[in-house]
Amino acid sequence: MVLMDMLKESADYIRNMAGDMKIDLAIVLGSGLGDIADEIQDATVIDYHDIPHFPVSTVPGHKGRLVIGSLEGHNVMCMQGRFHYYEGYSMADVVYPVRVMKILGIDSLFLTNAAGCVNRSWKPGDLMIIEDHIKLIADSPLRGLNPDELGPRFFDMSRAYDKTLIGVAEAEADKLGINIRKGVYMLFTGPAFETPAEVRFARTAGADAVGMSTVPEAIAASHMGMHTLGISCLTNMAAGILDQPLNHEEVLETGERVKKDFSALVRGIVRNWPVLF
Ligand code: HPA
């Protein structure tokens, strides 16, 4: 079956379950940050398993379901759990849900993640607006035949993270008294955390954070002309900065600790989400 037909079947299933409403934005929730989906009202919950052609998440802390409903006056579709390259999916699989969003008429994407902090002046628990990213690995969700219906073969990435949305996020953080950071996120494939040498390399290259997600989705969103905002929860200092090993529990624990701030920030941003088209 060709990609566009698969996407349409997935979208039709979601529309049949949730009703044919205009969804203002989609939110992708990262590791340990999924609880905000429980705050969505009049929610339709759809397991990824049940959506035709959808991949299925395998990571602890990732629930693997769509929650569609109302949050802060907007209709939102929330991905509670996402797909990672390290799970064995192709890059195209990783971005499949973002493409379904576009078919559903969603033009705005709010990506969140847990990330390692590379910037030595910052600390675990800090939140960072993604201003730009670095994808050093060779693979891309757009490698191969270009799906022309979705976007052009060659496309601009100089506005991958929308300036207006960054402004909204900064203003909301300010209102809430959150000392938000802005920086560059660098993709590593994982599942191994980076080595100390890789983290030094990332810093030299201009990265402030390292992580295993978000970049493929932001690329696919840019390809389709979607407006994207990215926020990282810096759950740990990246490898080699502190004299201690890294583990996934620390990532989840920090997510838990900053949950209240993170949730308030996400809600504030959604409340003030602008109409960009
Ligand atoms: N590296 C990569 N991904 C991560 C990290 C990290 O240190 N922390 C949370 N996600």
Image (cartoon, grey):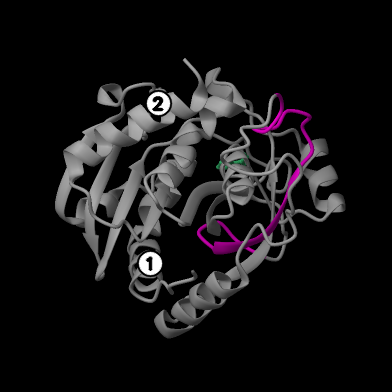
Q: Which residue is mark 2?
A: 57
Residue 245 in picture, x, y percent from top left: 62, 35
Which quadrant of the figure has residue 75?
A: bottom left
Check residue 178 for magenta coloring.
no
Residue 233 in picture, x, y percent from top left: 51, 55
Q: Is residue 147 left or right of residue 269?
A: right
Q: Which residue is mark 1?
A: 261
The residue closer to the viewer here, 226 or 128, is: 226
Q: Is residue 124 left or right of residue 271?
A: right
**Mark 1 or mark 2: whose residue is earlier in sequence:** 2
Check residue 139 for magenta coloring.
yes
Q: What amino acid is found at the position of numbered circle 2 in the picture?
A: Ser
The residue closer to the viewer here, 163 or 23, is: 23
The relative height of residue 273 versus residue 235 in the rendered view (above or below) is below
Q: Nearer the viewer, mark 1 or mark 2?
A: 2
Q: Quarter for ligand 1?
A: top right
Which quadrant of the figure has residue 48?
A: top left
Q: What amino acid is found at the position of numbered circle 1 in the picture?
A: Asp
Residue 33 in picture, x, y percent from top left: 38, 49
Q: Residue at x 40, y 59 (%)?
A: 258
Contact check, label 1 and label 2, Cβ < 8 Å? no
The relative height of residue 107 versus residue 247 in the rendered view (above or below) is below
**Region rendered in magenta:** 122-144
- For label 2, the crowd category at 10 Å Cα-Cα, with few meaning under 14, some 14 to 19 and many 20 or more, is some
- What kind of element bears circle 1? helix
